[in-house]
Amino acid sequence: MRLPSAWQAVSVPDGLADAVEREYQSHTVYPPREKLFAALEKTPPARVRAVILGQDPYHEPGQAMGLAFSVPNGAKLPPSLRNIFRERSDDLGLPLRENGDLTDWAEQGVLLLNCALTVRKGEANSHSALGWERLVDDLLRSLAAEPAPICAVLWGGFAAKKAPLFASSHPRLILTAPHPSPLSAYRGFFGSKPFSQINAFLRSHGEPAICW
């Protein structure tokens, strides 16, 4: 298991590759193997302008595609993604988005990274102990050296704990809010205006806004 070349400065922890391979061989695992590092492939470190952290991939068929919160175009929108799109609409005055494929965000520099990159079918958070968290933490730390302004979007308590990993001498913005899940979105996710805040931060540092 090799990381995309742009991220090769980060080492895969001992044992992780073998553990992931065993899971793919013995269980139905999402995302498909060929999309395992989709987030890293589509958003190399030098292009990262924002990081949106998820916990782990969707665990039902036809959903996980290697980008946190994203589903293939045409797939039914999961509840958290519907709430993200609702907040996007309210924040930016845009029509509700129907296409759940967030590849366009990733290609503009939004790193859509889960804290565990794999999951067993039907078993949420089943790969949290495989060693992914150590790798993902190292990936996030590696962004400290990037001179470009970067915004970290940390939804929910689990993601918020990652805030110290973004410490840097370069411009950074940390946005925290409750998770967009229906269980917590009404506690402050709605009305948090992350999309306009990200774009204002980028513009203030001479960077183009993201077309959400």
Image (spheres, rainbow, N blue to C red):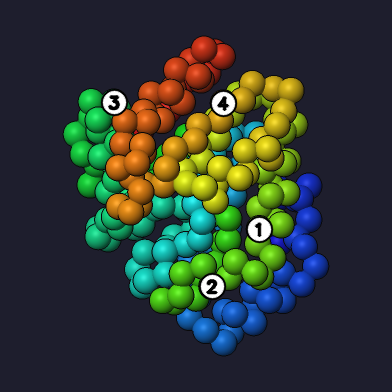
Q: Is residue 97 left or right of residue 30?
A: left
Three-letter amino acid code at the position of disc 3 = Leu
Residues marked 1 and 4 touching at CB (< 8 Å): no
Characterize the local packing of mark 2: few (<14), some (14-19) or many (20 or more) Cα atoms within 10 angstroms: some
Three-letter amino acid code at the position of disc 2 = Ser
Q: Residue 22 location in percent, x, y? A: 64, 82
Q: Distance between the residues labelled 2 and 1?
A: 13 Å
Observer-side mark, 2 or 3, equals 2
Q: Residue 42 location in percent, x, y? A: 53, 46
Residue that numbered label 1 is attached to: 133
In the rendered image, the quadrant that contains the N terminus is: bottom right
Q: Which residue lies furthest to the front in this view?
A: 187
Vertical placement of 33 versus 5: above or below?
Answer: below
Characterize the local packing of mark 1: few (<14), some (14-19) or many (20 or more) Cα atoms within 10 angstroms: some
Three-letter amino acid code at the position of disc 1 = Glu
Residue 109 appears in view: no
In the rendered image, the quadrant that contains the C terminus is: top left
Observer-side mark, 4 or 3, equals 4
Residue that numbered label 4 is attached to: 173
* Circle nearer the N terminus (2, 3): 3
Characterize the local packing of mark 3: few (<14), some (14-19) or many (20 or more) Cα atoms within 10 angstroms: few
Q: Distance between the residues labelled 4 and 3?
A: 19 Å
* Circle nearer the N terminus (4, 3): 3
Q: How far apart are marks 2 and 3 (CA)?
A: 36 Å
Q: In which quarter of the image is residue 49?
A: top right
Q: Distance between the residues labelled 1 and 3?
A: 33 Å
Residue that numbered label 3 is attached to: 92
Q: Residue 76 location in percent, x, y? A: 25, 60
The residue at the point 36 percent across, 37 percent down is 188
Secondary structure under the numbered disc 1 in the rendered image: helix
Residue that numbered label 2 is attached to: 126
* Circle nearer the N terminus (4, 2): 2
